[in-house]
Amino acid sequence: MIYSVLVEVSLRPGIADPEGATIERALPALGFTGVSDVRAGKAFRFSIEAANEDEAVRHAQGLADRLLSNPVIEHSVVRVEDAR
């Protein structure tokens, strides 16, 4: 079965996020007030072939840990969005 997967990667708590800080500082100048604690990240969408959803998540998490993120400073979350 083929599963559609979303992997979201963000910096771990306590790791400085200069991109998020820059966005947060720019928001008031653009008319967006009341926004705080901005953290930047990245998202990856792909399809993966697996026997079941648990296997798809395991494979995608392995991919995220070894290629898509730096597990020392980043955290990744894997979600299966649908199956075909």
Image: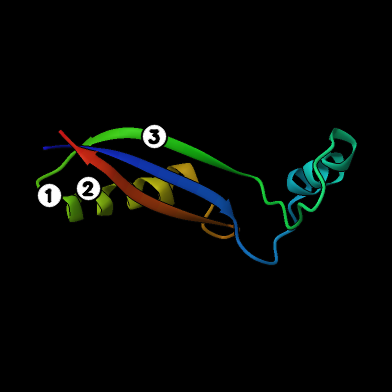
Q: Name the element at disc 1.
A: loop
Residue at the far bottom in the pictured view: 14
Q: Secondary structure at mark 2?
A: helix
- All told, the count of numbered labels is 3
Number of the label disc, if any, that sits on residue 6 = none
* Neighbours of disc 2 within 10 Å: few (<14), some (14-19), many (20+): many
Distance of mark 2 from mark 3, alpha carbons? 13 Å
Residue occupying image coordinates x 47% and y 54%: 76
Q: Residue at x 49, y 39 (%)?
A: 43
> Residue beneath label 1, please?
52
The reply to whether callout 1 and callout 3 are in contact (CB within 8 Å) is no
Q: Residue type at mark 3: give it.
A: Arg
Lower sequence index among marks 1 and 3: 3
Residue sitting farthest toward the right: 29
Mark 2–mark 1 Cα distance, whole angstroms, equals 6 Å
Amino acid under label 1? Asn
Q: Position of residue 2 (x, y in %)?
A: 16, 35
Q: Quadrant of the N terminus?
A: top left
The image's colouring method is rainbow
Seen from the viewer's position, the closer of residues 54 and 35 is 35
Q: Nearer the viewer, residue 62 or 5?
A: 5
Q: Are marks 2 and 3 in contact (CB under 8 Å)?
A: no
Q: Are marks 2 and 1 in contact (CB under 8 Å)?
A: yes
Q: Which residue is mark 3?
A: 45
The image's mark for residue 56 is 2
Residue 64 horizontal/vertical position (percent): 41, 47
Left or right placement of residue 24 versus residue 13 in this view = right
Residue type for callout 2: Ala
Q: Residue at x 26, y 48 (%)?
A: 59
Query: Considering only order in the chain, which callout, 3 or 2, is on the residue closer to the N terminus?
Result: 3
Which quadrant of the figure contains the C terminus?
Answer: top left
